[in-house]
């Protein structure tokens, strides 16, 4: 499966926003975005002025990178959101937030969405007691997410859960730290997503 293999910190600098792509490193002084808050490349420190199309494109790129999707998968997700009833932009964010890999990250079982995807593909998590290795699976209210019994001993998962106690989980999720069990309580609402995103620009871009 195709995936981005370049430096993660370069993406944060390109979007001029900390995307938290490297887990705990993003919360320390080692974060490259904190040290160099300008776009990468030879002309990164020059003046930047975007056209209307440029603003729409940058917003799409930012959201793609936050959730770790490539272009084809992101377009398919947008098409799915457009077919649903309601506001397309809100539907898009709700679908992205409901992905299995994002839920594992939000529940604190992984330090980043990248880590969550890797752990899921290696079969370390279950949904309602069944092992699932598809990161893009969409969860629904009532679904229960757990690491497999033998996977609870993995140091990376244990460390993530410890730090998640301080970070907390969103209102649409519940976690029992003692049982290593997370539950989807409701579908996420747009006003509960704190990451600065203007999904209307993405809708306008795909409507051209």
Image: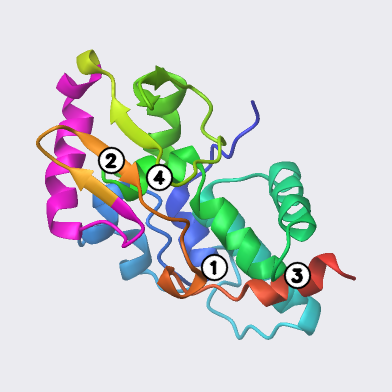
The C terminus sits in image quarter: bottom right
Residue 203: image x %, image y %? 75, 70
**Of callouts 3 and 4, which one flags the residue occurring earlier in the amino acid sequence?**
4
Query: Dots 2 and 3: beta carbons under 8 Å?
Result: no
**Of callouts 2 and 3, which one flags the residue occurring earlier in the amino acid sequence?**
2
**Of callouts 2 and 1, which one flags the residue occurring earlier in the amino acid sequence?**
1
**Quadrant position of residue 170:** bottom left
The segment highlighted magenta reads 151-173
Please name whichever residue, 186 or 71, is drawn nearer the observer in this view of the structure: 186
Query: Dots 4 and 1: beta carbons under 8 Å?
Result: no
Q: Residue at the front extreme?
A: 142
Q: Label 4 vs label 2: CA separation?
A: 9 Å
**Of callouts 1 and 3, which one flags the residue occurring earlier in the amino acid sequence?**
1
Q: Label 4 vs label 1: CA separation?
A: 23 Å
Mark 4 Cα shell of 10 Å, populated few (<14), some (14-19), many (≥20): many
Residue 189: image x %, image y %? 48, 67
Q: Residue at x 49, y 44 (%)?
A: 140
Q: Which mark is residue 103?
A: 4
Please give the residue where the numbered disc 1 appears in the rendered image: 15
Please give the residue where the numbered disc 3 appears in the rendered image: 203
Query: Dots 4 and 2: beta carbons under 8 Å?
Result: yes
Q: Of discs 4 and 1, which sits in the foreground? A: 4
Q: Of discs 1 and 3, which sits in the foreground? A: 3
């Amino acid at each position: 499966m195709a995936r981005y293999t370049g430096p993660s910190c370069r993406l944060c600098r390109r979007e001029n926003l900390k995307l938290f792509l490297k887990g705990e490193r993003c919360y320390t002084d080692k974060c490259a975005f904190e040290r160099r808050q300008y776009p990468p490349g030879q002309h990164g420190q020059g003046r930047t002025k975007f056209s209307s199309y440029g603003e729409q494109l940058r917003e799409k790129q930012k959201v793609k990178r936050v959730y770790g999707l490539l272009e084809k998968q992101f377009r398919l997700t947008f098409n799915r959101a457009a077919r649903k009833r309601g506001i397309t932009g809100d539907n898009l964010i709700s679908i992205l937030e409901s992905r299995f890999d994002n839920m594992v990250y939000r529940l604190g079982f992984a330090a980043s969405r990248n880590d969550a995807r890797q752990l899921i593909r290696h079969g370390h998590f279950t949904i309602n007691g069944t092992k699932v290795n598809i990161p893009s699976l969409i969860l629904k209210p009532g679904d229960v997410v757990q690491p497999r019994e033998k996977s609870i001993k993995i140091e990376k998962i244990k460390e993530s859960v410890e730090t998640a106690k301080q970070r907390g989980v969103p209102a649409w999720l519940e976690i029992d730290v003692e049982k290593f069990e997370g539950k989807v309580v409701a579908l996420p609402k747009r006003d509960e997503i704190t990451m600065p995103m203007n999904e209307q620009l993405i809708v306008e871009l795909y409507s051209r």
